[in-house]
């Protein structure tokens, strides 16, 4: 880890399936400080719990390079998910976030809704599938994305909500419209 702290070249880091745990998250958080050049980190299936989410959230507050973060198949729970999201309030570079299968529920959904309403947050693709989000949680997210113009895909499958609900369909429409606008901007 010591060699990576002075890293000026490595931009992609995939440490998935390595049992990093909370201790490793604390060390990794040092790698993504304000001077980091790392833009892609995959920490899928690493036994990271709420404490690890706190470390990573603190690091995200200062980071200006990270664009992709994959934390699927960990154990963040609501507490760790909320701590991670706290780091996004001042973060403007992260565009892809995968936090599927982390036992995230209502408290996380409320925090996520707040983050989605902030103008500086540039999240485009978010996967929160296989968590514990219910119909009310999806409704709170729906209210948050009404004025969001950056979110192009929000994966909600395998949660405890009705995928045929009006709220879910609204999210699909808004994200699809945002994707079309993004493609049009790229063409023009």
Image: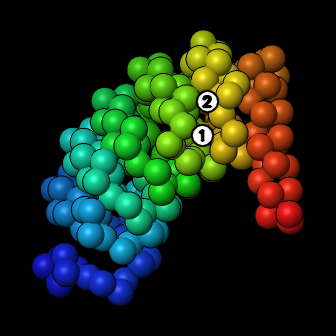
User: Colour scheme in the image?
Assistant: rainbow
Percent position of residue 107, x then y:
41, 20
Residue at the image point whose x is 37% and y is 43% from the top: 90
Q: Write down the quadrant of residue 62 in the picture.
A: bottom left
- Crowding at dot 2, Cα within 10 Å, few <14 / some 14-19 / many 20+, comes out as many
Q: Is the Cβ of the residue at disc 1 closer than 8 Å to that at disc 2?
A: yes
Q: Write down the quadrant of residue 169 in the picture.
A: top right
Is there any visible trace of residue 72 in the rendered image?
A: no
Q: Name the residue that disc number 1 marks.
A: 129
| Secondary structure under the numbered disc 2 in the rendered image | loop
For the C terminus, give its image quadrant: bottom right
Q: Is residue 12 above or below residue 31?
A: below
| Secondary structure under the numbered disc 1 in the rendered image | loop
Numbered circle sitting on residue 159: 2
- Crowding at dot 1, Cα within 10 Å, few <14 / some 14-19 / many 20+, comes out as many
**Number of numbered discs overlaid on the protein picture:** 2
Is there any visible trace of residue 99 in the rendered image?
A: yes
Q: Is residue 75 above or below residue 7?
A: above
Residue at the image point whose x is 49% and y is 62% from the top: 67
Percent position of residue 64, x then y:
38, 61
Percent position of residue 118, x then y:
51, 33
Q: Is residue 161 left or right of residue 183?
A: left
Q: Going from the N terminus, do you reach mark 1 or mark 2 first?
A: 1
Residue at the image point whose x is 83% and y is 40% from the top: 177
Q: Residue furthest top?
A: 136
Residue at the image point whose x is 79% and y is 25% from the top: 170
Comparing 56 with 178, the one in front is 178
Question: How far apart are the two marked residues, 1 and 2, measured between alpha carbons?
Answer: 6 Å
Numbered circle sitting on residue 27: none
For the N terminus, give its image quadrant: bottom left
Comparing 61 with 126, the one in front is 61
């Amino acid at each position: 880890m010591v060699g990576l702290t002075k890293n000026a070249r490595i931009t992609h880091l995939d440490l998935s399936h390595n049992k990093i745990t909370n201790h490793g998250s604390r060390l990794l958080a040092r790698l993504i400080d304000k001077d980091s050049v790392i833009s892609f980190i995959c920490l899928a299936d690493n036994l990271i719990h709420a404490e690890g989410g706190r470390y990573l959230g603190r690091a995200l507050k200062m980071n200006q390079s990270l664009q992709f973060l994959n934390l699927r198949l960990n154990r963040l729970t609501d507490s760790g998910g909320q701590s991670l999201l706290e780091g996004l309030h001042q973060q403007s570079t992260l565009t892809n976030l995968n936090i599927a299968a982390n036992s995230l529920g209502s408290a996380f959904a409320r925090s996520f809704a707040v983050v989605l309403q902030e103008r500086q947050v540039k999240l485009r693709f978010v996967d929160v599938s296989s968590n514990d989000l219910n119909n009310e949680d999806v409704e709170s997210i729906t209210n948050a994305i009404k004025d969001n113009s950056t979110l192009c895909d929000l994966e909600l499958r395998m949660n405890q909500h009705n995928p045929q609900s009006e709220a879910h369909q609204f999210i699909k429409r808004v994200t699809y419209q945002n994707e079309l606008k993004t493609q049009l901007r790229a063409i023009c």
